[in-house]
Image (tube, rainbow, N blue to C red):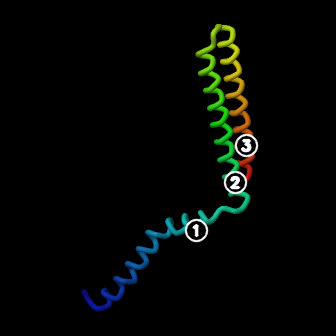
Amino acid sequence: MGRGAQQKEPYFMKKLILLATAPALFAVTACGPDSAVEERGDALEERADAVEDYGDDQASALEEMADEAPTDAQEDALNARAEEIDDIGDDRADALNEVADEME
């Protein structure tokens, strides 16, 4: 190889590396820090998860009580209430998630 080819090779390699890494660099810069509104949205999503988990836990406790109920009527009433509580938790979590999605 001649001397001119050796001088062009490092320049070519620099361009090749730049072109290969450009998409990653653009992706990193596009994913900057969250704004305050986005952070509040993330916190709201966490709250929604907690609300849903709480509803699930309360419903599970009622279902366990229903399993131990002395009569079928009491078991049915406890299971119905457990389902209502689970639905309330799910609905509230969905509402919180909708607000959070609007913030992002």
Q: What element carries label 1?
A: helix
Label annotation for residue 13: none
Identify which residue, 64 or 5, lies in the foreground: 64
- Whichever of callouts 2 and 1 sits on the residue coming sooner in the sequence is 1
Identify which residue, 47 or 2, lies in the foreground: 47
x%, y% of residue 61? 62, 26
Quadrant of the rendered image containing residue 12? bottom left
Quadrant of the rendered image containing residue 53? top right
At 67% from the left and 28% from the top, the residue drawn is: 86
Determine whether label 3 and label 1 are within 8 Å by CB: no
Look at the image and tell me in which quarter the N terminus lies: bottom left
Neighbor class of circle 1 (other Cα within 10 Å; few <14, some 14-19, many 20+) is: few
At 46% from the left and 71% from the top, the residue drawn is: 19
Quadrant of the rendered image containing residue 95? top right
Which residue lies under the disc numbered 3?
Answer: 96
At 70% from the left and 52% from the top, the residue drawn is: 41
Q: Is residue 71 above or below residue 95?
A: above
Q: Is mark 3 on a helix, strand or loop?
A: helix
Type of amino acid at the residue the image marks with label 3: Leu
Label annotation for residue 104: 2
Type of amino acid at the residue the image marks with label 1: Thr
Q: How far apart are marks 2 and 1 (CA)?
A: 17 Å
Type of amino acid at the residue the image marks with label 2: Glu
- Whichever of callouts 3 and 1 sits on the residue coming sooner in the sequence is 1
